[in-house]
Amino acid sequence: MSQYDVAIIGSGPGGYVAAIRCAQLGMKTAIIEKYSTLGGTCLNVGCIPSKALLASSHHYEEATKHFEDHGIEIPGDIKVNLEKMIGRKQAVVDQTTGGIDFLMKKNNIDVFTGVGSFKDATHIVIEGEETTTIEAKNTIIATGSKPSSLPFITLDKERIITSTEALKLKEIPKHMIVIGGGVIGLELGQVYRRLGAEVTVIEYMDRIIPGMDGALSKELNKVFKKAKFNMMLSHKVQSVERVGDEVIVKAENKKGEVVEFKGDYCLVSVGRKPYTDGLNAEAAGVKLTDRGQVEVNEHLQTNVSNIYAIGDVVKGAMLAHKAEEEGVFVAETLAGQKPHIDYNLIPGVVYTWPEVAAVGKTEEELKESGVDYKVGQFPFRALGRARAGGDLDGFVKILADKKTDEVLGVHMIGARCADLIAEAVVAMEFRASAEDISRMSHAHPTFAEAVKEAALAATDDRALHV
Ligand code: FAD
């Protein structure tokens, strides 16, 4: 029987990064993945394919709506070839997952294909083409998550679909009804809206992207409405029914009236749930929480001392980079180091256009905890770079401690915010004040100047270009 210092179950961004770091630290490492490709949700049916389709649909929108403003004329009709677009997305996915195969080989990590389940706390049975059992001194559970649904919805995966099916549709929907105004629903809704579908977003809360700073929700809602999305906030979905090729969704509004929506596709994007099916966690004595997560302490250790868990299957934000940080954290813990993760500084990003990104505390959280804070905000439309490119929507908002000026939260919506947020993370990691940011030179003309201007606005209202 093969013996390992560490076995990792699941090859998503949590699992494969943990494997690389364990191998770097000299541990004999095995990774177990039930699917034939490595990379988990993120690489196969999550982050990467969704960004590929967002990029393609963005190009189409630019060509059909904005090229003319720039004096670019394309004779004849511009058409979408959805099959080719989905094919390109798949090629990007294949190349990316192939890259993980390479990294596993390079780091001498043994890859097992099959479902991994515990026999006991140190033995894992892998059921693939053949059944193998391995022995591992330590195990990291990185089994991720799956789309969740509402109890009364039957997902037929043809017309009533999850994000996984939405990434490989064979036609552009005429009317896509998106249940849930969170990150995944909005990103995929925007893909199909750009390609010409009518899109209705039904959200239970009174705002989209709940959990992010309210100002971001408001601005993104405004932009989506301008792009002719039907934004139905404060609507509680009651039923979803398929009749032939039609999907009928009924939802109750704030007044208690039942409103009916008819579409040809319904994307159910109401969140994701931790995934532990087939893991046989009980055989190892590993405890799960009431919500189905693997229970861990502050060292990401389960109640069984040689078994750890990371990523979407444990508490916290369901994000690829959070899973990666946790993978490194556990590997270094196993090597006897004392790593640290500051969960307050894990950024959240929505890859719609404009992009939305945030780190640290929201204004609502600061209010609730009674912290005395100040706000500096700067609109992108006041920037030369934004005007040169024609990307005018959005703003950067910095929240700083009123007394000490320490930056407590940065919230932004606008072009390239997914990348701009890194500056805020660095600043907050080093506990910068708003004044610190405002005194750093930012290249001109760049979108990053909005960060400096918002910092100036937060320190005695000194923004220069408004
Ligand atoms: P996963 O990536 O879910 O990987 C778990 C792996 O474990 C899977 O491959 C699974 O097959 C395998 N597995 C499970 N059980 C077993 C078993 N018993 N034996 C063997 N293998 C097993 N996050 C971002 O940060 N940025 C984004 O832009 C982003 N976009 C997203 C878009 C979509 C449409 C979706 C659905 C998600 C997106 N996410 C994004 C979330 C991100 O994909 C997850 O947070 C991330 O994949 C979690 O990583 P993980 O390693 O915990 O688990």
Image (cartoon, rainbow, N blue to C red):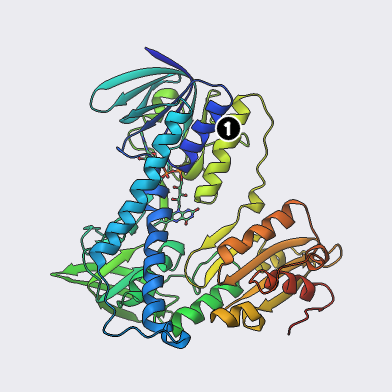
Q: Nearer the viewer, residue 63 or 172?
A: 63
Q: Residues within 10 Å of mark 1 (few under 14, many from 20)?
A: many
Which residue occupies 67% across, 35% down?
Answer: 339
Which residue occupies 56% across, 62% down?
Answer: 418
Q: Nearer the viewer, residue 83 or 292?
A: 83
Residue assigned mark 1: 330
Q: Hey, what amino acid is under mark 1?
A: Val
Q: Is residue 16 above or below residue 282?
A: below
Residue 345 image point, x, y percent: 66, 53
Extreme-right residue of the structure: 403
Residue 252 is drawn in which quadrant? bottom left
Q: Element under label 1?
A: helix
Which residue occupies 49% across, 40% down?
Answer: 14
Image quarter (top left, top right, bottom left or bottom right) of the N terminus: top left
Q: Is residue 95 above or below residue 4?
A: below
Q: Nearer the viewer, residue 28 or 386?
A: 386
Which residue occupies 54% across, 48% down?
Answer: 321
Residue 201 image point, x, y percent: 38, 74
Q: Is residue 88 above or below residue 288?
A: below
Q: Is residue 17 left or right of residue 41?
A: right
